Image: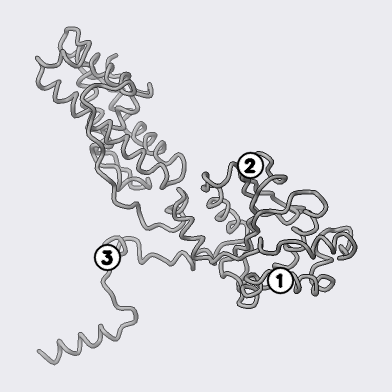
């Protein structure tokens, strides 16, 4: 028996990449390295990926432009730092998707376009021009980009061979006269290459990251305590609750303080407010972590799922809100990206959010 145990242990030890499989990996499979995923993108998808990241840099750019089609004049994605846009301070993000690391022969024509069109006054030279490729830059190009003088010398030396004929369609752009003077005095330090892993880490701060690479949402903090007094943002849904209580009791219940003599309704009112704030905390929590409209999509799913219950016959408004919130807790949301994040209290709270937005009214 001991010999058999040892042989099994040895067998497992010899298996490739033997490790403990976590529950979410058992359900979905091991997470694929994002570095491998981006290498499968088509060129347009790679540009979209970078565009998502640049658009998220709200504190850096006041606007973003992504030209499409031919004639982009060397601009893939421009991030504007001021209202002057291409005539002000801006950064250029050159998106290059190839099966091999980016080499000088690919980067050189793009450098040439920046030089020519900034010299021609089409735009002001960018503050930075970053080459971004899924496999990064080749060793030789990386070394060139760290030495502005050597890069300038290389560009000038290779102009006729590698650059002149790839700038404009009418014909080769000659490096001579005032244009040569411009290139000779140009600050080549603006050109650089970003590491793909660095871009992935930066993209992780955008709301598009989870839909591209998975991994799930991080741990969610506890919601803040519910304010003692009903706040202005709550007036619509809480007034609808009080109206439902009035119908249920057959007497006017105009304020929350009048619930003191109805212990069951007072408890329900407090639970409803807690649920509302719980759902609000979920909305805020996912706002910067998932694509725009994701939480609103969850609200729409719940609204659709409770509609028959909401439209059904109920003795009064209080019975309706109890039935609807109970139904909301049991709706299958397996296809929605927030299905594992929406707790029962969130689901009940979303019903009150919907009431607050005018989409549900308990008393008929």
| The C terminus - image quarter | top left
Left or right of 296 in this view: 244? left
Q: Which mark is residue 350?
A: none
Q: Position of residue 180 (x, y in %)?
A: 85, 64
Question: Is 240 on the left-hand or right-hand side of 37?
Answer: left
Q: Position of residue 19 (x, y in %)?
A: 28, 75
Q: Nearer the viewer, mark 3 or mark 1?
A: 1
Q: Nearer the viewer, residue 112 or 219?
A: 112
Secondary structure state at the residue bearing disc 1? helix
- Decide: marks 3, 2 in contact (CB < 8 A)? no
For marks 3 and 2, give the CA distance. Answer: 47 Å
**Colour scheme:** one colour
**What label does residue 22 carry, if any?**
3
Residue underneath mark 2: 82
At horizontal 80% and vertical 64% (from top left) the residue drawn is 166
Q: In terms of image quadrants, where is residue 173?
A: bottom right
Vertical arrangement, residue 295 with respect to residue 75, above or below = above
């Amino acid at each position: 028996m001991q010999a058999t145990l040892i042989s099994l242990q040895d067998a497992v030890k010899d298996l490739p990449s033997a490790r403990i499989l976590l529950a979410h990996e058992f359900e979905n499979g091991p997470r694929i390295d994002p570095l491998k995923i981006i290498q499968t993108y088509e060129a347009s998808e790679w540009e979209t990926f970078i565009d998502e990241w640049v658009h998220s840099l709200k504190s850096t750019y006041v606007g973003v432009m992504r030209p499409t089609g031919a004639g982009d004049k060397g601009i893939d994605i421009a991030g504007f730092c001021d209202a002057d846009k291409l005539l002000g301070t801006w950064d250029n993000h050159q998106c290059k998707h190839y099966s091999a690391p980016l080499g000088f022969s690919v980067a050189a024509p793009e450098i040439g376009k920046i030089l020519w069109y900034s010299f021609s006054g089409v735009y002001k030279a960018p503050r930075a021009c970053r080459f971004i490729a899924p496999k990064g830059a080749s060793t030789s190009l990386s070394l060139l980009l760290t030495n502005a003088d050597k890069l300038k010398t290389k560009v000038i030396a290779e102009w006729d061979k590698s650059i002149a004929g790839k700038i404009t369609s009418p014909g080769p752009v000659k490096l001579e006269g005032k244009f040569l003077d411009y290139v000779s005095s140009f600050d080549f330090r603006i050109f650089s290459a970003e590491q793909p892993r660095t871009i992935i880490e930066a993209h992780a701060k955008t709301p598009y990251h989870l839909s591209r690479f998975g991994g799930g949402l991080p741990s969610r903090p506890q919601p803040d305590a519910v304010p003692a007094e009903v706040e202005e943002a709550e007036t619509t849904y809480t007034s609808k609750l009080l109206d439902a209580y009035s119908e249920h009791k057959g007497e006017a219940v105009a304020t929350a303080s009048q619930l003191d003599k109805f212990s069951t309704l007072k408890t329900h009112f407090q639970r409803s407010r807690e649920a509302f704030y719980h759902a609000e905390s979920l909305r805020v929590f996912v706002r910067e972590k998932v694509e725009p409209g994701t939480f609103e999509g969850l609200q729409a799913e719940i609204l659709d799922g409770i509609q028959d219950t909401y439209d059904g016959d109920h003795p009064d408004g209080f019975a309706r809100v109890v039935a609807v919130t109970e139904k909301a807790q049991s709706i299958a949301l397996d296809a929605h990206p927030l299905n594992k994040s929406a707790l029962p209290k969130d689901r009940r709270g979303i019903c009150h959010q919907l009431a607050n937005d005018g989409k549900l009214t308990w008393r008929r």
